[in-house]
Image (cartoon, rainbow, N blue to C red):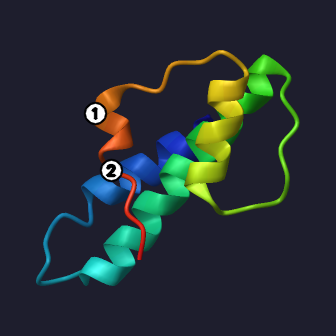
Amino acid sequence: MAMAERDHRALRGMEDPAVFSEEIFGFHVQQAVEKALKAWLCALGVPFPRTHDLDELGVLLEQAGQKIPESCLALSVTS
């Protein structure tokens, strides 16, 4: 979780779109969320595959009986 916190702090410094492109900002957002989900799974003792798929990690949490807040689900974007 500490790694996710560091990524989150870095994001706060990237809020100026004149300095950081949306792609760079988005990459770091994905990294912070991925690390937080993996930390949550670790805390529960749930094994997870090597993946960057946030939806897959979310499914594992739901299968473990965890409720992901609706506000977080709205952030999932499929491209």
Q: Are marks 1 and 2 in contact (CB under 8 Å)?
A: yes
Residue at (48% x, 61% y) in the render: 30
Quadrant assignment, res 15: bottom left
Is 21 located above or below residue 12 in the figure?
A: below
Quadrant assignment, res 64: top right
| Badge 1 density bin: few <14, some 14–19, many ≥20, Cα 10 Å | few
Is 7 located above or below residue 61 in the figure?
A: below
Q: Which residue is mark 1?
A: 71
Residue type at numbered disc 2: Leu
Nearer to the camera, 40 or 72: 72
Q: Which residue is mark 2?
A: 75
SS type, badge 2: loop
SS type, badge 1: helix
Residue at (62% x, 34% y) in the render: 1
Report x, y in % for residue 76.
Answer: 39, 54
Which quarter shows the C terminus?
Answer: bottom left
Q: Is residue 32 left or right of residue 40?
A: left
Quadrant assignment, res 41: top right
Report x, y in % for residue 63.
Answer: 71, 26
Report x, y in % for residue 19.
Answer: 19, 82
Residue type at numbered disc 1: Ser
| Badge 2 density bin: few <14, some 14–19, many ≥20, Cα 10 Å | few
**How far, Cα to Cα, is label 1 from label 2?**
7 Å
Is 64 located above or below residue 49 in the figure?
A: above
Q: Is residue 75 left or right of residue 68?
A: left
Residue at (60% x, 18% y) in the render: 66
